Image: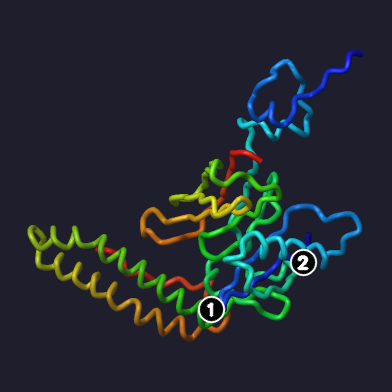
């Protein structure tokens, strides 16, 4: 089967149904997909009954699932909404920064107790660089214009002393 | 050749009448046999490697998929389980007689998250 069923939720997000069972004898692809969609609308009404759907070639999909929450229904395609993907990427950078900052707490406290002044200064600079990174990353991400560029983006994390 | 009547569906479900043969297309009624299963992965879209008694799989978004069964199971008596390859918690919920919802949760962050390869198996009565 070369087509998938794309449901547009009220908030613009999409659900994508991949049909599995074989087509009936003499059934056209359109009839087949409508039958699969009708089955879902009947059997899972809370999710599907009120939704419109379109069918899309299964190859017309974003290259990566990384920005799945930013997928939207396009012209015979599932496409990534680049501004939404940018927001997701910024959130991911902040989340990773928070993890790295939290992971550095233990060493920071240890240096406060037993480290030299130089070691404390170096480590403070490292932690400040972590704090500053999201702002620089936001600027870099805002300059990107394509999904491919967003997928390729990776911040340069400061090196722990 | 002596004709031997096969076990009825009720006899198969009850695992009684053990001397009777069971037709291959009726083995599925045995309580010890999986009533539906699927193996799929979250790549770009969603790739289903193999399945049984599953009409479709719906990718609902990050970490959540719904299996729509071809033949319904008795939801109150069904058991659904599964596993996956990523470092995620994995829950399988029976939404209705024909809908099984699979959700992955990142074990570190607690957020709903995509999984790697997912395997879901449903037992119960057809």
**In the displayed structure image, the side of residue A142 where residue A71 appears, left or right:** right
- Work out whether residue A50 or residue A1 is closer to the camera in this orientation and state it: A50
**In the displayed structure image, the side of residue B60 where residue A23 appears, left or right:** right
Q: Quadrant of the C terminus of chain A?
A: bottom left
Residue depicted at x 55% and y 81% = A82
Describe the element under mark 1 as helix, strand or loop: loop
Tag of residue A11: 1
Residue depicted at x 58% and y 66% = A47
Describe the element under mark 2 as helix, strand or loop: helix
Q: Residues within 10 Å of mark 2 (few under 14, many from 20)?
A: some
- Work out whether residue B26 or residue B50 is closer to the camera in this orientation and state it: B26
Residue depicted at x 78% and y 30% = B24
- Work out whether residue A89 or residue B93 is closer to the camera in this orientation and state it: B93
Q: Are dots 2 and 1 in contact, CB under 8 Å?
A: no
Circle 1 marks a residue in which chain? A
Name which quarter of the figure residue B22 lies in: top right
Q: Residues within 10 Å of mark 1 (few under 14, many from 20)?
A: few
Circle 2 marks a residue in which chain? A
Tag of residue A149: none
Q: Position of residue A31 (x, y in %)?
A: 82, 65
Q: How many marks?
A: 2
**Going by the picture, which residue comes out furthest to the top?**
B1
Q: Is residue B61 above or below residue B72?
A: below
**In the displayed structure image, the side of residue B22 where residue A43 appears, left or right:** left
Q: Position of residue B120 (x, y in %)?
A: 58, 45
Q: To which residue does mark 2 refer?
A: A34
**Which of disc 1 and disc 2 is earlier in sequence?**
1
Q: Position of residue B109 (x, y in %)?
A: 36, 59
Q: Position of residue B72 (x, y in %)?
A: 66, 48
């Amino acid at each position: 089967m070369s087509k998938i069923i794309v449901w547009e939720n009220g908030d613009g997000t999409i659900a994508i149904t991949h049909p599995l069972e074989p087509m009936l004898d003499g059934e056209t692809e359109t009839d087949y997909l409508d039958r699969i969609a009708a089955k879902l609308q009947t059997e899972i009404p809370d999710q599907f009954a009120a939704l419109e759907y379109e069918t899309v070639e299964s190859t017309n999909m974003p290259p990566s699932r990384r920005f799945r929450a930013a997928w939207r229904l396009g012209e015979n395609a599932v496409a990534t909404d680049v501004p939404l993907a940018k927001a997701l990427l910024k959130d991911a950078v902040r989340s990773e920064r928070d993890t790295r900052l939290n992971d550095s707490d233990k060493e920071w406290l240890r240096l406060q107790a037993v480290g030299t002044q130089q070691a404390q200064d170096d480590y403070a600079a490292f932690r400040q660089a972590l704090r500053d990174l999201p702002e620089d990353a936001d600027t870099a991400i805002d300059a990107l214009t394509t999904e491919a560029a967003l997928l390729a983006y990776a911040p340069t994390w400061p090196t722990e002393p | 050749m002596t004709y031997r009547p096969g076990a009825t569906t009720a006899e198969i479900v009850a695992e009684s009448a053990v001397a009777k043969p069971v037709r291959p297309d009726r083995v599925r009624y045995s309580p010890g046999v999986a009533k539906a299963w699927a193996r799929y992965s979250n790549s770009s879209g969603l790739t289903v490697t193999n399945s049984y008694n599953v009409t479709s799989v719906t990718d609902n978004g990050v970490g959540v998929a719904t299996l729509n069964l071809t033949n319904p199971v008795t939801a109150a008596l069904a058991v659904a389980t599964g596993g996956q390859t990523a470092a995620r918690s994995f829950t399988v919920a029976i939404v209705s007689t024909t809908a099984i919802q699979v959700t992955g949760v990142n074990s570190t962050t607690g957020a709903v998250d995509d999984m790697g390869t997912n395997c879901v198996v449903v037992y119960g009565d057809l």
